[in-house]
Amino acid sequence: MPVLVIAEHDHASLKSATLHAITAALQMGAGAPSEVHVLVAGHNAGAAAQAAAGVAGVAKVLHADAAHLAMPTAENIAAVALSVLPGVYTHVLAGATGFGKNILPRIAARLDVAQISEITSVVSPDTFVRPIYAGNAFATVQSKDPVKVVTVRSTAFDAAAATGGSGTVETIAVPADTGHAVVIGQELSRSERPELTSARIVIAGGRGLGSGENFRMLEALADKLNAALGASRAAVDAGYVPNDYQVGQTGKIVAPDLYIAIGISGAIQHLAGMKDSKVIVAINKDAEAPIFQIADYGLIGDLFVLVPELTAALG
Amino acid sequence: MKILVPIKRVVDYNVKVRVKPDGSGVDTANVKMSMNPFDEIAVEEAVRLKEKGIATEIVAITCGTAASQETLRTALALGADRAILVESDIELQPLAVAKLLAAVAGKEQPQLVILGKQAIDDDANQTGQMLAALLDWPQAAFASKLDIAGGGATVKREVDGGLETIQLKLPAIVTADLRLNEPRYATLPNIMKAKKKPLETTNPATLGVDVAPRLTTLSVVEPPKRKGGGRVADVAELVAKLRNEAKVIS
């Protein structure tokens, strides 16, 4: 029986979280790769559906098109998924992003099954590893429910190749608008920089920067390295930067090749969001800061001197 | 308008948890317990709605052992009017909690349920959305601003890359994100008063809910240790190491 991945997209292309979820989905078969179907629910999202069909390993795309899916609510996406799920799919997956976390529990409850949140590995088709207590422990859990509803931590699975697949696209009927809620606006932060969760290099600032104005000195460094900008919860709480910059247990989980923590002390909840980065650099004036215990390269000193120096050194 | 506020008693967020030597779970004996921080935000939001004259009654509810009464008393001290404990000694997973809450919501008929987006112990981030599905109510998950007017709610919610504004019909479920508000501290007089507020106890059998766990935890382990602690003397050494040793910049 096939496995369903609910795609996150902007109607034109797939979000990277979906590619990571497809990799996890392919591991849900006992022994052999699973037959993976992708649900693309949107409005005029044919391009996203075609993109999904082209992802390596995808056998079929279910394309749901309706005006009320242009800026969809959790209720309406769940309704589409529930119209195709029963008796057909063994697993339903999505990325453990704001999108997936909003929708999948709704589907699980309707199916009367447990959800397994934010898995980091697939042990077998019914057994998964997931972090608990902000990543301070990892639990291996087994589900005996007939359908496994799973969100996938992107940093734990490679992205499936965006090309090379030859899936078919099937248009499916769309249930009527549930009328529960309507999306009336979106304020998305526009940035020329790479997205925080998929960037190869992340520069993150903490309370040590002292102000939102000072935070801007990180931009020059980020520009040099083509890096994304992140922040600790302390910096977000202090109002230096918007909430979507937040890296940590309650923010975004990142695992770039290089993470540069600047003026961040290293609270447990921040470390939970970045400690799987390949290389960690910490710049902090407090030699006792916990961030140094996990940093590969710790540089003790005044960030207001060192950051401009580093920016200049990268020429 | 009546507001139902589900809360959870969890290991305090400042505690560094330890995995039990037998790998059966996390050691919670003799560890400081507190209200889940996101639930504190939910309680605060409800109290503010009452202070604005929008809410008339706030009912705090928790599902767990008898020790959870302490957490309910905290909610009462923060401004909830009465409390309900759904007492159970077995592990309650999110689906079971959502079913218990749905059963109580059926009796209490609240217009709004506000709860934390996630509990910091199991990090599931499921209960609010599951409750919304079971009741077939609208949901606004990860709320950072809530306005109630004209029989509906307008919610700004945190989404990847920014904010989304949605309008919901009531009754509805709202899950609280970090920026929704900054919770107050309970004052001593209010802590004393909370001891006299009503606290009702019920249980899953009375509510007719099967709470048997659906997931079995096979093992719990510590995360792999990261080997850190490396130091560089200056920017020049850092750049050289990043280029030549780690090879993460060109």
Image (cartoon, coloured by chain):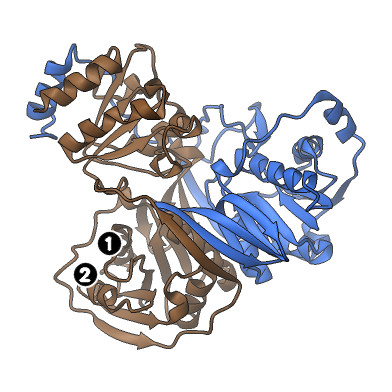
Whether A95 is drawn above or below B201: the answer is below
Q: Chain letter for blue, please.
A: B
Residue that numbered label 2 is attached to? A55
Question: Which amino acid is tagged 1?
Answer: Leu
Q: Residue at x 52, y 54 (%)?
A: B157
Q: Residue at x 51, y 39 (%)?
A: A133
User: Where is residue A247 shown, x and y percent of the image?
Assistant: 39, 38
Q: Nearer the viewer, residue A305 or A274?
A: A305
The answer to the question of whether label 1 and label 2 lie on touching residues, with beta carbons closer than 8 A, is yes
Whether A295 is drawn above or below A58: the answer is above
User: Where is residue B111 shown, x and y percent of the image?
Assistant: 76, 62
Whether A184 is drawn above or below A2: the answer is above
SS label for mark 2: loop
Q: Colour of chain A?
A: brown
SS label for mark 1: helix
Question: Which amino acid is tagged 2?
Answer: Val
Q: Nearer the viewer, residue A203 or B232?
A: A203
Chain bearing tag 1 is A
The answer to whether B49 appears left or right of A5 in the picture is: right
User: Where is residue B151 shown, x and y percent of the image?
Assistant: 73, 66
Numbered circle sitting on residue A19: 1
Residue B10 visible in the current orientation: yes
Q: Residues within 10 Å of mark 2 (few under 14, many from 20)?
A: many
The answer to whether A170 appears left or right of A137 in the picture is: left
Residue A260 visible in the current orientation: no
The quarter in which the C terminus of chain B is drawn is top left
Q: CA distance from mark 1 to mark 2?
A: 8 Å
Chain bearing tag 2 is A
User: Where is residue A87 shown, x and y percent of the image?
Assistant: 47, 82
